[in-house]
């Protein structure tokens, strides 16, 4: 089957969409997009014109993408025809933008971040003809985000990733209009940030002798850390792309890497080693020792200097209390401070850290456990154990970032067929599918309209207990991150999963060309079987533009024995169930997993 046939199918599918979305392949979907007739051609005569010298950083990044992706270097001119005009409008809200494409001119209008987002939308609209001609359909877009906080988190503490990869990840984030990179830098399993006052933290605490894969150890030494100069470089790199980095320094639990270096900061005095088994550990920073707070304040002072973010994330999750219950100094602290129990001791701990962070002009974020024992006055809550913590915090007037594990933990499996997937968080029983992410609604009706304003955004988390390669990071993150981008940016009333899938098809083809090893979704229609006259009727659409579907109906491997899907399948019911299988092959040759039709 030729690519042109699938291109025709895709074109026919687009023709069935509402007129306002035809030709608008952008993810996330803009607030308003009006498709016009005609197109703008990018040619050798095309020039860039800027109104406001502050446009230059955005223009430079735009030029770099055109050079790297299409081999075109557009010059900057003061005027002309066939131009791309960048207009800085300082009166416009920062992330709002307008994009106008006509036959002779493209206008990008925005203030700082908005101008950047206009350029990202424009890049997504570029079309390549068979003869190599680049064009952009005429369109008018007026756009702005639904939520001000749109985040992704990488857990580099459990598994280290290089500076180059962090930058690559930030590039992908920015392209889909995420604006917060939550950087989980310390854990039981490793300390990844250089602290000048305590060089031992990275000399010793950044390394371990083995990594757990499933229930086995690989016996391969693993580690690494980021120097302060590298962090400054990454922070600037992100800022240039309008991504804010929020560092996370875990406390009072998840502290074994630090305690392996400074056991005197624990309740028992150690000795400790970085644990090789995943799971929650009992060792914890001692809340009864003043030297604990001295250490943490010294660490945070250096962290705050490195990150211009408004927020510092202090963790606060999964802090087991047994050591505090058994520690004379912690019990003395409880008595002296008039606290009721160890939960209130954690509240004391968090409030004290918050007071210090506030004194430095910053605010804290903590996981929803910081609600236990009484929340710190100015804290923002990251609700991960479902939505309960977020509902409670918002109802108390605290800002909330929704990141419920049952919708937005991207280390969870993506389908029920675990044998068909790389290893994920096997302890969680249900998958988090692409449609689960897309259909998540942060404004739960369990929060009053008055308090919904405290839901400031959403975030997905990529935890690394089971993700130990860049390829698997990409597989677990994409395309689910594109679904979340739409949850975070696009108006609720304009969302449509079917429309999203049509736009996702082109975006995944683009990611394939960039070498991003995303999970290839099941063909559209695979789970929508119709039964007629004893036959299973299956109509499929390739999930990625330019891809091909191969299928078998006898239970054999479709990547070896499959026929090319060309038209509606009509299969006797006795041959359905585990007998019907398919794979998707991308234009670059990569295959999906084998998808098996469920008998239920």
Image (tube, rainbow, N blue to C red):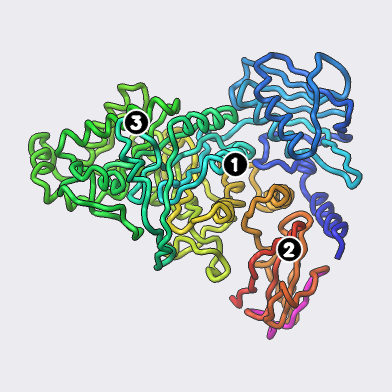
Q: Label 1, label 3: how many angstroms apart (C-alpha)?
A: 27 Å
Give whichever of 502, 246 is nearer the camera: 246
Residue under label 2: 585
- Please determine whether, in this image, residue 245 is positioned above or below residue 50: below
Residue at point 8%, 45% (across, down): 328
The residue drawn where x is 68% and y is 85% is: 574
Gap in Å between the C-alphas at discs 3 and 2? 50 Å
Percent from the top left, x then y, of residue 119?
70, 30
> Which mark is first along the chain, 3 or 1?
1
Kind of element beneath mark 2: strand
Of mark 3 and mark 2, the one earlier in the sequence is 3
> What range of the chain is rendered magenta?
567-577
Judging depth in this view, the residue of 163 and 317 nearest the camera is 163
**On screen, residue 302 above or below 449:** above
Q: Secondary structure at mark 1?
A: helix
Q: Residue 279 vs residue 596: left or right?
A: left
Q: Residues within 10 Å of mark 2 (few under 14, many from 20)?
A: many
Task: Tell me the tag on residue 168.
Answer: 1
The circle drawn on residue 196 is: 3
Q: Is residue 393 visible?
A: no
Q: Position of residue 7 (x, y in %)?
A: 84, 55
Q: CA distance from mark 2 to mark 1?
A: 25 Å
Asked if residue 89 is among those painted magenta in the image, a careful observer would answer no
Within 10 angstroms of label 3, few (less than 14), some, or many (20 or more) residues? some
Magenta-drawn stretch contains 571 = yes
């Amino acid at each position: 089957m030729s690519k042109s046939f699938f291109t025709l199918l895709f074109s026919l599918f687009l023709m069935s969409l509402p007129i306002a979305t035809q030709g608008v392949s952008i993810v996330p979907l803009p607030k308003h997009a009006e498709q016009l007739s005609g197109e703008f051609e990018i040619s050798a005569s095309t020039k860039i014109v800027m109104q406001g010298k502050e446009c230059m950083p955005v223009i430079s990044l735009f030029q770099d993408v055109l050079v790297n992706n299409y081999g075109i270097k557009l010059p900057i001119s003061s005027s002309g025809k066939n131009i791309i005009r960048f207009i800085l409008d300082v009166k416009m809200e920062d992330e709002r933008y307008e994009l106008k494409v006509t036959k002779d001119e493209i206008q990008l209008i925005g203030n700082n971040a908005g101008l950047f987002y206009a350029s990202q939308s424009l890049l997504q609209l570029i079309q390549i003809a068979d003869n190599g001609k680049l064009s952009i359909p005429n369109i008018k877009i007026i756009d702005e985000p639904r939520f001000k906080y749109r985040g992704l988190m990488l857990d580099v503490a459990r598994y280290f990733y290089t500076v180059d990869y962090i930058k690559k990840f930030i590039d992908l984030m920015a392209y889909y209009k995420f604006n917060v990179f939550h950087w989980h830098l310390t854990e039981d399993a490793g300390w990844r940030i250089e602290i000048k006052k305590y060089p031992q933290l990275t000399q010793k605490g950044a390394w371990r002798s083995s990594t757990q894969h499933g229930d086995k150890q690989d016996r391969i030494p693993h580690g690494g850390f980021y120097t302060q100069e590298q962090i400054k470089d990454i922070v600037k790199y992100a800022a240039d792309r309008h991504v804010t980095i929020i560092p996370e320094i875990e406390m009072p639990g998840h502290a074994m890497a630090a305690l392996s270096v400074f056991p005197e900061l624990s309740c028992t005095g150690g000795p400790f080693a970085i644990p090789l088994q995943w799971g929650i550990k009992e060792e914890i920073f001692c809340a009864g020792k003043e030297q604990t707070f001295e250490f943490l304040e010294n660490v945070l002072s250096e962290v705050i200097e490195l990150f211009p973010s408004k927020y510092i994330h202090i963790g606060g999750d999964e802090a087991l209390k047994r050591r505090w219950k058994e520690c004379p100094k912690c019990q003395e602290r409880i008595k002296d401070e008039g606290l009721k129990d160890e939960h209130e001791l954690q509240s004391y701990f968090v409030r004290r850290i918050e007071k210090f962070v506030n004194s430095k002009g910053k605010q804290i974020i903590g996981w929803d456990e910081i609600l236990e024992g009484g929340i710190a006055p100015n804290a923002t809550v990251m609700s991960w154990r479902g939505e309960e913590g977020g509902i409670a915090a918002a109802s108390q007037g605290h800002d909330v970032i929704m990141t419920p594990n049952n919708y937005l933990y991207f280390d969870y499996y993506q389908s029920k067929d675990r044998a068909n997937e790389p290893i994920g968080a096997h302890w969680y029983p249900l998958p988090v599918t692409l449609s689960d992410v897309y259909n998540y609604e942060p404004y739960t009706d369990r929060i009053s309209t008055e308090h919904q304003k405290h839901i400031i955004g959403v975030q997905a988390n990529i935890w690394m207990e089971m993700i130990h390669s860049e390829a698997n990071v990409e597989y677990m993150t994409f395309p689910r991150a594109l679904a979340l981008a739409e949850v975070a940016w696009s108006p609720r009333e304009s969302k449509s999963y079917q429309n999203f899938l049509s736009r996702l098809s082109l975006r995944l083809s683009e990611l394939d060309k960039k070498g991003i090893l995303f999970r290839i979704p099941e063909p559209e229609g695979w789970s929508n079987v119709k039964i007629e006259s004893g036959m299973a009727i299956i109509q499929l659409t390739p999930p990625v533009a330019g891809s091909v579907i191969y299928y078998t109906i006898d239970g054999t491997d479709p990547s070896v024995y499959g026929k090319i899907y060309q038209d509606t399948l009509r299969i006797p019911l006795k041959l359905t169930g585990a007998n019907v299988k398919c794979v998707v092959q991308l234009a670059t040759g990569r295959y999906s997993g084998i998808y098996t039709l469920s008998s239920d």
